[in-house]
């Protein structure tokens, strides 16, 4: 591997040393438990129509006790650093992948826990919430990952409709490449916290040969121009196309 310093465009200005260490630790864990998949020769197609050479399976973390304990410890520390120790009054997981993370995080924070369904079940404004509805409480929405933020917006809106105060959401992994995601969250005033991104994974891949040099090169091409990479391989090539694709799929 080249020994030149790695520049990660995905790193936000002002990111603290702790945040960087947490991101790289999370990326190492995900690589070690084989939750990271690189497949540039046979791209994945997401529900939004984007083509991608990378896919991450954060659900695998639940099967590795030491890995999940470390990641949940980092999650709570991140939440406390960026939101506050006593600010969050309730934790809600998004169906289904967010439920175990919400349970572990709520337990560590000593907070009530509930979960929000993808679709209402039953009647009334609380039909999507299972557990005590955190009405009037500042509620943290938890999921395993986000690509374009769409599910976070739906879940947050369901919580708000039920009377919860939902201004913050946490995920273990944020793709951080597709257009529109951060902008949509900002539009509805939903603050996103995450531990790691694909740039962090790529940086850790320079430490050990988890994947071939060719695969790493192709993944970097994707990260530098995800829209063009997707379009050139038959996927959607704009935010408008992605919205139309999702609408057509229902």
Image: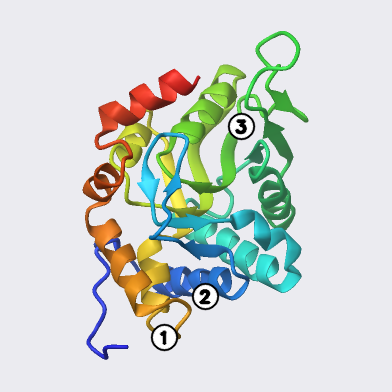
Nearest the viewer among 181 and 55 is 55
Q: Are marks 1 and 2 in contact (CB under 8 Å)?
A: yes
Which residue carries the number 2 mark? 28
Per the model, the C-alpha gap separating discs 3 and 1 is 43 Å
- Give the quadrant of residue 9: bottom left
Residue 129: x and y, percent? 70, 25
Which residue carries the number 3 mark? 137
Which residue carries the number 1 mark? 207
Q: Is residue 149 left or right of residue 12?
A: right
Q: Which mark is residue 250?
A: none
Residue plotted at (39% across, 35% down): 49
Q: Earlier in the sequence, mark 1 or mark 2?
A: 2
Asked which secondary structure carries label 2, the reply is helix
Q: Earlier in the sequence, mark 3 or mark 1?
A: 3
Asked if 178 appears above or below 159 in the picture, the reply is: below
Asked which secondary structure carries label 3, the reply is loop
Per the model, the C-alpha gap separating discs 1 and 2 is 10 Å
Residue 175: x and y, percent? 41, 52
Taking the view exactly as shown, the residue that stands out farthest to the top is 123
- Give the quadrant of residue 58: bottom right
Per the model, the C-alpha gap separating discs 3 and 2 is 35 Å
Foreground: disc 3 or disc 1: 1
Q: Are marks 3 and 1 in contact (CB under 8 Å)?
A: no
């Amino acid at each position: 591997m080249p020994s030149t310093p790695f520049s990660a465009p995905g790193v936000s200005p002002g990111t603290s040393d702790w945040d960087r260490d947490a991101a790289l630790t999370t990326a190492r864990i995900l690589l070690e438990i084989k939750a990271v998949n690189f497949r540039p020769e046979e791209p994945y197609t997401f529900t939004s129509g984007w083509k991608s050479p990378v896919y991450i399976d954060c659900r695998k973390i639940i099967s590795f006790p030491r890995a999940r304990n470390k990641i949940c410890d980092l999650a709570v520390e991140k939440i406390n650093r960026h939101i506050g120790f006593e600010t969050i009054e309730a934790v809600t997981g998004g169906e289904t992948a967010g439920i175990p993370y919400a349970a572990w995080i709520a337990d560590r924070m000593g907070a009530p826990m509930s979960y929000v369904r993808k679709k209402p079940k039953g009647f009334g404004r609380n039909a999507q919430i299972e557990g005590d509805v955190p009405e009037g409480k500042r509620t943290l929405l938890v999921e395993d990952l986000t690509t374009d933020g769409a599910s976070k917006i739906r879940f947050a809106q369901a919580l708000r409709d039920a009377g919860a105060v939902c201004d913050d959401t946490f995920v273990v992994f944020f793709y951080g490449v597709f257009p529109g995601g951060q902008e949509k969250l900002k539009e509805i005033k939903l603050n996103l916290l995450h531990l790691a991104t694909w740039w962090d994974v790529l940086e850790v891949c320079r430490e050990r040969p988890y994947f071939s040099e060719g695969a790493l090169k192709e993944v970097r091409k994707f990260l530098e121009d995800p829209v063009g990479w997707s379009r050139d391989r038959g996927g959607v090539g704009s935010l408008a196309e992605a919205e139309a694709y999702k609408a057509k799929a229902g």
